[in-house]
Amino acid sequence: MNMAEDRLGAERLKGAYAWRSFLEQGNRLVSGSDYPIELANPFHGIHAAVTRQNHQNQPDQGWIPEQALNVEEALLSFSLDAAFAAHQEEKLGGLSEGKWADFIIIDQDIFTISPEDIWKTKVLQTWVAGKLVYEQE
């Protein structure tokens, strides 16, 4: 957000980071962390997609706020739609019969907390193929 207009220019910026516009056109939105440029933590990306703000809740109303997603849309873009983009939607991206049962347990309900706090979400447990592989001490 800090460099986009300088690098893209005002005209090309209109079509960049246009998550809401993509969804309204019927597209799937695929999200990821952009690691190693950004932290791998997906809750940082979900926070940014919903609030269009940094961790200091700036800019005030969000950066290009008309392109914001709701929490469900942002989570879908990091899970099932990301699995779809990798041609893995039959195995990954959600919890249903026949899938690998990869999931996490988190410390707060991102659907009910203030969106500004989504990035603070902590993983308590990580399960891969139905087996516990990480548990916070």
Image (cartoon, helix red, strand yellow):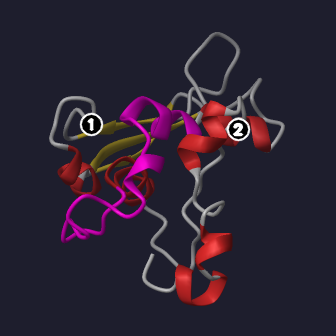
Instruction: For mark 1, give the secondary structure.
Output: loop
**Image quarter of residue 89:** top right
Range drawn in magenta: 52-77
Q: Is residue 74 magenta?
A: yes
**What residue would you read off at disc 1?**
110
**Residue 78 visible in image:** no
Q: CA distance from mark 2 to mark 1?
A: 21 Å
Residue 83's label in the rendered image is: 2
**Label 2 neighbourhood size at 10 Å, few (<14), some (14-19), many (20+)?**
many
* Residue 21 - label: none
Residue 3 horizontal side relative to residue 47, left or right: right
Residue 109, position in %: x, y?
Answer: 22, 32
Mark positioned earlier in the residue sequence (2 or 1): 2
Please provide percent x and percent y for residue 5: 54, 81
Q: Give the residue furthest to the bottom.
A: 6
In percent of width and height, residue 130 lies at: 53, 28
Amino acid beneath label 1: Ile
